Structure formats: structure tokens, C-alpha cells
Amino acid sequence: MSEARPDAPELRKDPVSGRWVIIAKGRAKRPHDFEQAPAFKPGQFCPFCEGSEDACPDEIIAYRPQGAPRNGPGWRVRVVPNKFPALEIEGDLQKRGEGIYDLMRGVGAHEVIIESPQHVLSTADLSAAQIEEVLWIYRDRLVDLKKDSRLVYGMIFKNVGAAAGASLEHTHSQLIVTPIVPINVWEEMTGALEFYNYRGRCVFCDMIQQELTFEKRIVLDTPGFVAFCPFASRFPYETWILPKPHASHFENIQKHGVEELSGVLRQTIGKIETALDRPAYHYILHNSPFDTPELYHYHWHIEVIPRLTKPAGFEWGSGFYINPVGPEEAAAFLRDVEVLAQGRQSIPVRESG
Amino acid sequence: MSEARPDAPELRKDPVSGRWVIIAKGRAKRPHDFEQAPAFKPGQFCPFCEGSEDACPDEIIAYRPQGAPRNGPGWRVRVVPNKFPALEIEGDLQKRGEGIYDLMRGVGAHEVIIESPQHVLSTADLSAAQIEEVLWIYRDRLVDLKKDSRLVYGMIFKNVGAAAGASLEHTHSQLIVTPIVPINVWEEMTGALEFYNYRGRCVFCDMIQQELTFEKRIVLDTPGFVAFCPFASRFPYETWILPKPHASHFENIQKHGVEELSGVLRQTIGKIETALDRPAYHYILHNSPFDTPELYHYHWHIEVIPRLTKPAGFEWGSGFYINPVGPEEAAAFLRDVEVLAQGRQSIPVRESG
């Protein structure tokens, strides 16, 4: 067993809710260090731009012409470790107790996917071919990390805008891989399994069917994918993207699926950005845990969440969300928005929200 | 059955997670109406100050000298309906389905507790006697609303500072009463019941015992109450206040308990405000549902959550929180902070965070 540094990240379990928390003291702050990060300024040095490869930790993978050197320019999409990781890849889990409490070392991966060598600010400003490569590299990382038996879940997500917690504006996503199935994923899987056990159908397939029939919450409808504002949207303009045929594992997506999804993702984000004047937002890929076979009851999907409202004490305490915009209104608005073709001005994300 | 207005609030259930959402279109906003509310400015009209009673809806209850008129000055603590309620008290639930989805009318209560007739900004600037009256009025409202058989849970919470979602700075709390037990409460109760079934003890009593033995996460320790930073704190400087003797229902608190809690709440918030330079924060009273008898497995408590970090995509998607400050460090810091006596300058809450 390797000796853990005193500031090494820890995973601690709340004995009441069963929720795990990452205590990442490596990122520690003193009481007065919590001032909001200043907004990224035009002209400021960007460590994600081509030519600044030295400013990032040693790259994990990149798509670049064969033979071109690692950590140098010429790449199209690039994955590097997060410079301030919440979890660390080295070492064993050291699961243990402390009285009634459970904890383990914060073993895992925290990676950054740089989606373009140019200083592009939005997914909607990438070409469909570029987004395809982003999707392929998501998959490559999941397939690779699945081999590590200490790790059970990989969450791919993107934060855009300071109000969504992004510290750099250059278009990028993140991947956090954990040795525990996150509680929200667990609850989603459990709820979907209960539905399956009761009705014998995938709840997401049922939702797709019903939304396509109702039409009123549909944002986009393509042969293989659908985007809609869910019936119980927690947030205004919340939009989910799902593959129409049942599929539990994103990493089993086929080539034509990647091609189609890249267009759907670009359109959906373009609509949200145009409709809401480039709000801060997250998107999150909800996927099956690593150690599961193909599942009949779970259906991978992407949740896009504009950050327009600020969840407050009631939401934190209750888990009840108050959403001031009906998903029917939101979908009608997004459906009608025309996304401009590529070459839009890359204007920065609004800071408010 | 009364006919619901088309913009009446609805409760909708997510068929996957089982989470309920309040769709409150009465608060509806158009796409461009989400600019951050401007910060409250000194000198601005405050509807919560004594003399501005007309600016609030008809009062529900107030503590004032006997015989003094309703909705007039002379009160010490006052409860009014929220002017922009998330739920409405009139009407029946009209539980129904829409295909695979479940919904009901947004019946419930949304009240504001104005904690002082003066324009005071912080709980820590109230006298112990004033805080006692705030606690008594919390109890009075719970006891009254419990009689309504449509309603099952009352959540009392306080948002301080714009970053915590507060739109007015005058010290106030809120009460939202729902016809559904909120999912977070449900999970907390379920987790506590599992612990009780397995070990035969209340998990919160065990935590209190262990924290008092370890000492390292204790913030305050009085004969009847303890405040500590929980082992699996989700947020930096998160602090919980619990009564030491087992008690599942806040509304059964005794007079000496109110007296002691008022001092503990004032000290805890004073320490957090002094240590962190008046951060935005929430506090939330976690209490048993209305329709439960005294419970052996659940223990009411108050969670105080400074808003220093901004949960981002990973937290939203996973429910895993990343906390950059160990609770041991946080507690050590809070323990050592001296809270100034009353009469501190009432400086505004910081806007950042």
C-alpha cells in the first residue's frame, strides 16, 4: 500500500444519505480565497490554444496526423489531465472506516477534452466533423478507462460560462472517472429498473414514444435522435437528447450515430445559444456504469441545462426544483429558433445567470 | 373540483428519478428575462420594514402587542404570503396522469417570515430574544399548517445574499409547504431508517456521539446542542446544528430549547459571517414530515451552507460534490473565530461566490 499524502483527495460517504463527497484539499482554499474567478478577458493567454501545449500537463491522447509529435501543435482534438484534479489516478483505494464513517482515497481520473486547436468558444461554432471527433474521443477515453478495475463510472460533461463554473472560455469538456457509481446515476438507474420491472419497457423509450406522439415538447427530431424538453424539467429550457433506438452504453454508438449526433448536438446548442443570448450552460452525458452489460432498462442520453436560474435554499434542502418556464413553452420557442450557419461571430458567453 | 387557471402552478413527477418539480408559470419569464436581479441598494424602498406593511400581501400572523391592529406597525416578527408564490394554498390536488407522466396542481403554501421590523441584515445582528421569537413563529406556522390534510411537509429555509438567491436583504426566512415529501427529505429519512434497522440506533445520535468524542469537527458545544462540520461536508464550511437529546420533530421543542438554540444559531451564523467575510449562505431546517409520529430513527437539525463554491456540471450530473476544504480545517477555523457582540455594523453581504 502506498502512503497517501496528507492533502491527497479523499472520498467520504455521508452516513445518512449514502452520498459520496470528494474532499479535494489539493484544491484547498483559505477562508478569504473564494472571490469569484475573474472572467476570461479577450487577448489573455489561453493554455488550450494550439501552440500553448506546454501550458498543459502531458497529453493523454490527441487526434493529429500520424507521425506528428506528442504535446506539439498539429492536433485537432486533445485530452490532457486536469491541472487541478479532483481525483488522482495513482494508488489503491484504501477503503476504510473511521468510527461510523466510511472513506477511501480519491482515486480516479479527471481529464480535459480540448475540442478545437483554435480559440473557438462554442460547440455550435465547431464544424460537424469537429464535433464528430469530440464524440469519438469521448468514446476512446471511456473505452480505455473501463479497463481499470478500480473505476466504475465515467462522467463526461461540459461547463460553459462563468455562471456554470467554467474558468476558461476555449471550448472544452471534462471527464471525471470515479470508483463509486455517483448517487444521481444510481437513482436514475434504480428508477429506470423499477419502471422496467413493473412495465417491462425502458422508461426512456416510453418517453421518446410519448414525446413524438405529443409533439409539444419536441425541439429536434431526426431519423436516429430526438431532443425534447422533459415533462418534469427542473430548469428553464432544459433539453435532453436521446438516441431513438434503445441503447444503454454510449460507447457502443456506431459511426452513422456519431455523424448524426454531432449535427443534433450542434443544432441543439445553437438553438439554446441563439434563443437565450448565449447563456451559461452545462451538458452532461448520462451513461451506464463501466461494469454493466447491455441493459434493457437504461438508455444513455445527454442533458443540456442552461444556467438561467439560481437554485436556492429550498432546492438544496428539498431536491424539489421550481421552474418558471413550462417545458411546452420552452420547446416551442427552441423549435422556432433558426441557428445561423457556421461563421457566427464568436461572442463571449454572458456572465449573468 | 375548481377549475385550474392555465398558469396555475403544477407539480410534475420525473418518471425516471421520481423527483417532483414545481412548474410555476405564474413566475414565468420570457427567454431574455433572466438577467441577474440587481443587488439591493442602500436607501432603496424595503417592503419588509416597519411602516411598509401595505407593500406585502395580507399578513398571516405577527407577534405584536395585544390589541394592535393587523397589517400595521408595532410587530416584532411577521409572516406574510410570498408575493410571487411557487405554490398556491387554494383548491384540491387534482392528481392525474398524462400518458406515462404524473402530475397534480401546485397546492401548498409559500410564506415569508420577516424576522425584524428594523432593516437588519443578519441573524447575528438580532438579539437572542428576537431569534427566539423567530423560532417560535417557525413552530407556530408548522403546527398550524400540519392541520391541512392536503399537505405533508413544511420546509423552513433562509437565503442570504444574491448568490444564494435572495432578492431582498432585510433579514427574512421562507416556508414552503408541499403535498409531497421532497425527494431529499425522503432519501434522508430512508437512509436514517436503514441505519436504524441495521444498528438499532439513530444515525444522527451516533454522529453527535462520535463528533463529541473526536472533537476535531466541532464548532460549538452547549449543554443541549452541538454544531459541527459534517464528515462528508458537500460545501466548504458547511455546518450542522443538532439538538443533543434525540428529537425527530422541531415543533416539539421546549421553551428552554428555543432559548438555547437561539444563542447557538446566532453564534454559528456570526462565526461563519466573521470567518468568511459575510458570505452568501442558506440555512435549512430538516424536519420530519407532518404525518409522522415521534420517530426513533430521524433527528431534526439545521444545515447552514455558505455559498462559496459554484456547483457545476459534474455536481449536477453526479450528485457527487467536490469540496476544497476539509471539514476538520473548516471547524478549527470556525471554532477560533470570535463573534463580536451585538451592534456590529450591518454591512451588506458580499455579492460574489
Image (cartoon, coloured by chain):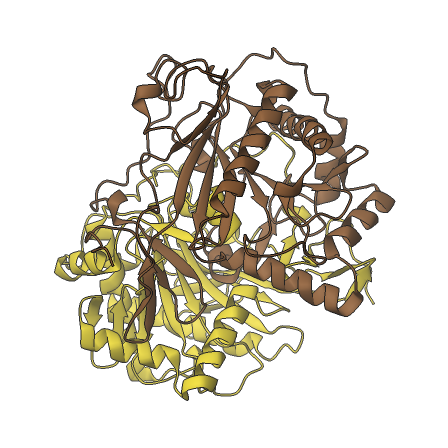
Chain colours: A yellow, B brown
Of B10 and B336, nearer the camera is B10
Q: How many marks?
A: 0
Measuring from the top left, give residue B43's x and y in whole percent: 36, 12
Residue visible at 14% across and 57% down?
Answer: A337
Drawn side of residue A317 relative to residue B73, left or right: right
Residue A75 appears in the figure: no
Measuring from the top left, give residue A115's x and y in whole percent: 38, 61
Residue visible at 70% across and 38% down?
Answer: B330
Which of the image's four quarters has the N terminus of chain B?
A: bottom left
Q: Residue furthest right?
A: B213
Q: Is residue B169 above or below residue B3?
A: above
Of B302 and B304, nearer the camera is B302
Measuring from the top left, give residue B155's x and y in whole percent: 51, 45
Residue A272 appears in the figure: yes
Measuring from the top left, give residue A170's x and y in whole percent: 37, 50
Q: Is residue A138 above or below residue B33?
A: below
